[in-house]
Image (spheres, rainbow, N blue to C red):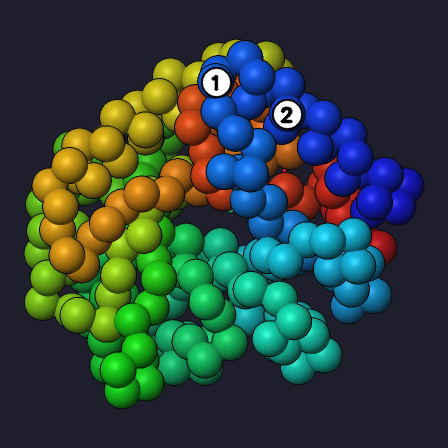
Amino acid sequence: MTVQENLSDINLKIESACRRSGRKPEDVSIVAVTKYVSIERAEEALEAGIHHLGENRLEGAMEKFDAIGSRAVWHFIGSLQSRKVKDMLHAYDYIHSLDRLSLAKEIQKRAEEGRTVSCFVQVNVSGEESKSGLDPEKTRSFIEELEQYPAVKVVGLMTMAPYAENPEEVRPFFQKLRELRNEIRSLDLPWAPCTELSMGMSNDLEIAVEEGATFVRLGSSLVGSEE
Ligand SMILES: *Cc1c(COP(=O)(O)O)cnc(C)c1O
């Protein structure tokens, strides 16, 4: 399947989920997760009209970044080691995996003078041990503490739901992330507008959109998962 064909199906799903939940499709941005695919396939996504590309590792992504550069908006969606920040920060527009103060401190240290780095705070809403992210109970105080790192701007919250045969099962996790986002947004913290919700992958796209996702991260259903 071409990316364009996959995208047509995905757009129909987003439109119907928006209709069911009274939302506007233009409020949902698609991040094409290109971690398993070639530069050519990533280019195909851009040609299909997608602007946002997501990668979860530094290896491999840098080649794509060199080839594509600022023709895409780049999202780092994987877990991020502090010592890697200095090599990746210039390439990415968004980091979806901010989950500890030591990482915020490193971003502060490595960001170019005057730049604010758009970050999602990753929350482990399901409480699964294998998932990274903050405990929901600790998210608010974590974000309040980020005031000391002015290079970090919290644009929203991100979560990964557990895989479920029936995606309906993950709805409570997305609801919880939205409630937490609403709570933090209402604090009006200058460093944390927290308007966005990065949630929803190939398997649970429609549920995530119904529950308010503003960035969905799609790999296998959009660009494929193997070469
Ligand atoms: C791989 C990945 C995705 C995309 O997953 P698909 O199920 O292939 O759509 C989304 N988010 C994160 C954090 C990922 O690592």
Q: At x 32% / y 28%, what residue is drawn? A: 178
The image quarter in which residue 64 lies? bottom right
Q: Is residue 16 above or below residue 203?
A: above
Instruction: Tell me the amino acid under the disc marked 2.
Output: Glu
Residue picked out by circle 1: 22
Which residue is disc 2 drawn over? Answer: 15
Is the residue marked by circle 1 packed among few (<14), some (14-19), or many (20+) residues within 10 Å? Answer: few
Q: Residue at x 83, y 45 (%)?
A: 4
Name the residue: 27% across, 87% down.
113
| Lower sequence index among marks 2 and 1 | 2
User: The C terminus appears in which quarter of the rendering?
Assistant: bottom right
Res. 176 visible in picture = yes
Q: Quadrant of ligand 1?
A: top right
Q: Residue at x 32, y 30 (%)?
A: 177
Figure check: 79 above or below 204: below
Residue 163 image-quadrant placement:
top right
